[in-house]
Amino acid sequence: MAKDTSGGPNHVAIIMDGNGRWAQMRNRPRLFGHHAGARRVREIVEACPGEGVKYLTIFAFSTENWKRTQAEVAGLMKLFRRYIQREARDLLANGVRVRFIGDRVRLDDKLVRLMDELELLTSQNDRVHLTVAINYGGRDEVTRAARRLAYDVAADKLSPADVGDETLPKYLDTYFLPDPDLVIRTSGEARISNFLLWQSAYAEYEFIDTLWPDFTPDVFAKVLTSFKARDRRFGAVKV
């Protein structure tokens, strides 16, 4: 019997937290947890169609994560490159369109090239839209968007009178995405950590204790079921 996905979120965004703690609980290095977390990403992406989730956005590396040890950062960058190379064929075959958001200037050339190639390779897919945030921060995104908007105003491409709350989103990294319906953060932390600040103005939030490597498709399904019971009013009051 097919699962009833009506009333579920169309776009889910996830702050994947807890990889390091998961590894430390097993007396393993933090990178061991990041590798486990990367494997979990694949399972959640595969679960999306059956749950009625068309868009999935994951927070892989923030603008603040550069403050971590050089060894951990280097290990994460290597993991990103390996993940793209290893998963590209399956992502293509499974109808997943992959796009990346964030400032690519600080990323190494090989990683950026692999990101560009994967975006092009999967550009015709439409079953699931996977967006990966790398070197991403909400404030940084809005700042970059405002700068581009200001340049267009200065170049007379846009009138100041035309700038409204529907204008800025066109300059955001996520201009191609609907706003998220649900934002999930794993590991028990109850903060949004500079993630999709503009886009999540009316999103529902779910903070769960589960560490990301333990966030199975079954846990995902339970969170989505909980979402369906929520009353989303978007600032209005039902009469």
Image (cartoon, grey):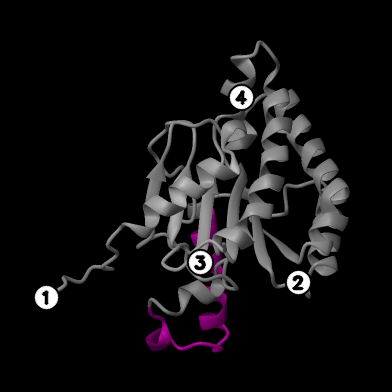
Give the crowd class for mark 3: few <14, some 14-19, many >=20 residues within 10 Å.
some
Q: Which residues are magenta?
A: 140-164
Rendering quarter of residue 63: top right
Q: Nearer the viewer, mark 3 or mark 4?
A: 3
- Residue type beneath disc 3: Asn
Is residue 167 one of those drawn in magenta?
no
Determine whether the residue tagged by mark 4 lies in a helix, strand or loop: helix
| 42 over 97 or under it: above or below | above
The residue drawn where x is 67% and y is 35% is 37
| 142 over 218 or under it: above or below | below
Rendering quarter of residue 232: bottom left
Q: Position of residue 226 (x, y in %)?
A: 38, 51
Give the crowd class for mark 2: few <14, some 14-19, many >=20 residues within 10 Å.
some
Q: Tell whether 7 sits left or right of 40.
A: left
Residue extending farthest left: 239
Is residue 160 one of those drawn in magenta?
yes
Answer with mark 3 or mark 4, whichever residue precedes in sequence.
3
The residue drawn where x is 42% and y is 31% is 188
Which residue is at the front of the view, 7 or 108? 7
Cα–Cα gap, marks 4 and 1? 47 Å
The label shown at residue 20 is 4
Residues at circles 3 and 2 in contact by the CB criterion of under 8 Å: no
Residues at circles 3 and 4 in contact by the CB criterion of under 8 Å: no
- Which residue is identified by label 1? 239
- Residue type beneath disc 4: Gly
- Which residue is identified by label 2? 125
Q: Position of residue 115 (x, y in %)?
A: 80, 56
Cα–Cα gap, marks 2 and 4? 33 Å
Cα–Cα gap, marks 1 and 3? 26 Å
- Which residue is identified by label 3? 10
